[in-house]
Amino acid sequence: MIKTKSARALVGCIVAIAAAAGSAISEPSSPPSAPLSEDCFAELTSGTGKEIACLFPLSLSEQERADLKVASRGYVENVTCQLVVRIARDKVDEAMAKADHIFQSPDQPVTCTVTTPKSTFDITATFAPRVVFKSNKATEATPGLGNVKGVGRVISWPIVQFVNRWPSIRSGMLQIVNAYRDHARKAKAAATR
């Protein structure tokens, strides 16, 4: 289990789930009757329901907060987010067989709280991760943060740039997606023995 709730973990989890699922993100048919798990990786790797359903909170690490503050020229001090993931499990299994492809996720809604030196306010946005796979390995990735609402462009632009372009987030995405794909292939091979 990955314990961090950093930006890399958030976007990595979104991309691992979404990239494995292709365009299979399912619309929730009804509100969940039980609380959603906050461990999306456990839901992805060992859940048994027809749907991967989880709640993924985000808290930036101290270094990520410092990087964001620099990227926003001191205006944005912190961002915390929450994402609900719902994906049909059979579509994830089906998509794992693809070795070479470009995956573009449909928009996935996220709600965030932004902290500036003077205020705290809520925003909404979407993630639409894009991942390029070659020979069963993710080689390029971007989280695709966009559609920010609830704040002006002077604040949204640095946040979008930070999330979509920061090297540690992009490399973290690749690490998490590739680790999941390796795990899934090994589990499938072990099951067929």
Image: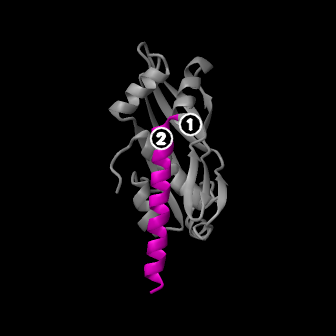
On screen, residue 7 above or below 90: above
Magenta segment, which residues? 166-193
Q: Residues within 10 Å of mark 1 (few under 14, many from 20)?
A: many
In which quarter of the view is residue 69 placed?
top left
On screen, residue 146 above or below 40: above
In the picture, the disc for residue 164 is: 1
Tally the numbered discs.
Answer: 2
Question: For numbered disc 2, what is the local secondary structure?
Answer: helix
Q: Is residue 116 visible?
A: yes
Mark nearer the N terminus (2 vs 1): 1
The residue that mark 2 highlights is 169
Q: Position of residue 176 (x, y in %)?
A: 45, 53
In which quarter of the view is residue 124 placed?
top right
Q: Residues within 10 Å of mark 2 (few under 14, many from 20)?
A: many
The residue under the point 39% across, 35% down is 60
The residue under the point 33% across, 31% down is 62
Is the N terminus in the top left, top right, bottom left or bottom right quadrant? Answer: bottom left
The colour scheme is: one colour
Q: Is residue 181 magenta?
A: yes
Kind of residue sitting beneath label 2: Ile
> Real-space Cα distance between discs 2 and 1?
8 Å
What secondary structure is the stretch in magenta mostly built from? helix
Q: Position of residue 138 (x, y in %)?
A: 55, 56
The residue under the point 48% across, 45% down is 171
**Foreground pick, 76 / 173:** 173
- Considering every residue shown, the one lying at the far bottom of the view is 193
Kind of residue sitting beneath label 1: Asn
